[in-house]
Amino acid sequence: AQKITQTQPGMFVQEKEAVTLDCTYDTSDPSYGLFWYKQPSSGEMIFLIYQGSYDQQNATEGRYSLNFQKARKSANLVISASQLGDSAMYFCAMREAPGGGSEKLVFGKGTKLTVNP
Amino acid sequence: KAGVTQTPRYLIKTRGQQVTLSCSPISGHRSVSWYQQTPGQGLQFLFEYFSETQRNKGNFPGRFSGRQFSNSRSEMNVSTLELGDSALYLCASSLRGTVLSQYFGPGTRLLVL
């Protein structure tokens, strides 16, 4: 079974600085997908970025980039130029496809990011 | 295009009662998945429905059930509520069930007293 580990319960960063949120994963599938979501206090899960296991380049979406190190089984999220609005919970997740066309996400425990002014 | 909507947004129940939560997917989406989020267990997959059929189920007791209607709206039901059922319940919809094209709703916060 897939497993996602986020070892940082909380992180603090100064506004305008960059921050890296750690994520390691474990899977025996050669094909997999990794996701990062942001969850503000309102509760909604907001998709940030996706990395496929066969993607040649690290994924980037605006201020978000994914530092994908396949051999180390890590998929760290880098947020550049942090903003106060980035304060939220961040979840790393992996796609699990048990068959029959169905897919689900397996989530890590999350990291609470606080951006200080 | 309207996003995923969940009703109610907040709910307070007492132990032993039952509860029904509703999820309306994005128009045209045929897959609806449900997740439970608690401080202790984190985010856990409950079940997925596609075209009115349950395709996948997580490791939850039989007290948790769901269904999907012909218009793709989905409901989940929890019978004989326990204190540990207090959680944020999130639903997500997608066209065919691929998580890459999945959108989450705002969630329903359930408090069991």
Image: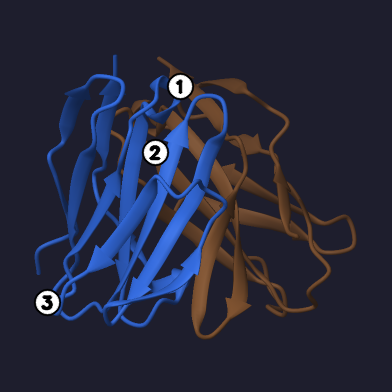
Chain colours: A brown, B blue
Q: Mark 2 — on which chain does it sit? A: A
In this orientation, which residue lies closer to the viewer: B113 or B92? B113
Q: In this orientation, does residue A57 appear?
A: yes
Distance (Cα) linking label 1 and label 2: 14 Å
The one of B57 and A12 positioned closer to us in this rendering: B57
Which residue type does callout 2 highlight? Answer: Gln
Task: Give the residue furthest to the right.
Answer: A71
Image quarter (top left, top right, bottom left or bottom right) of the N terminus of chain B: bottom left
Instruction: Give how far across and how far down residue B49 sits, in percent.
Output: 35, 71
> How far, Cα to Cα, is label 3 from label 2?
28 Å
| Spot occupied by residue B34 in the image (x, y as percentages of width and height) | 37, 55
- Same chain for the residues under marks 3 and 2 in the image: no
- Label number found at residue B71: 3
Q: Chain of mark 1?
A: A
For disc 2, the marked residue is A39
At mark 2, the secondary structure is: strand
Query: Hey, what amino acid is under mark 1?
Result: Val
Residue receiving disc 1: A115
| Callout count | 3
For residue A87, side relative to residue A50 (left or right): left
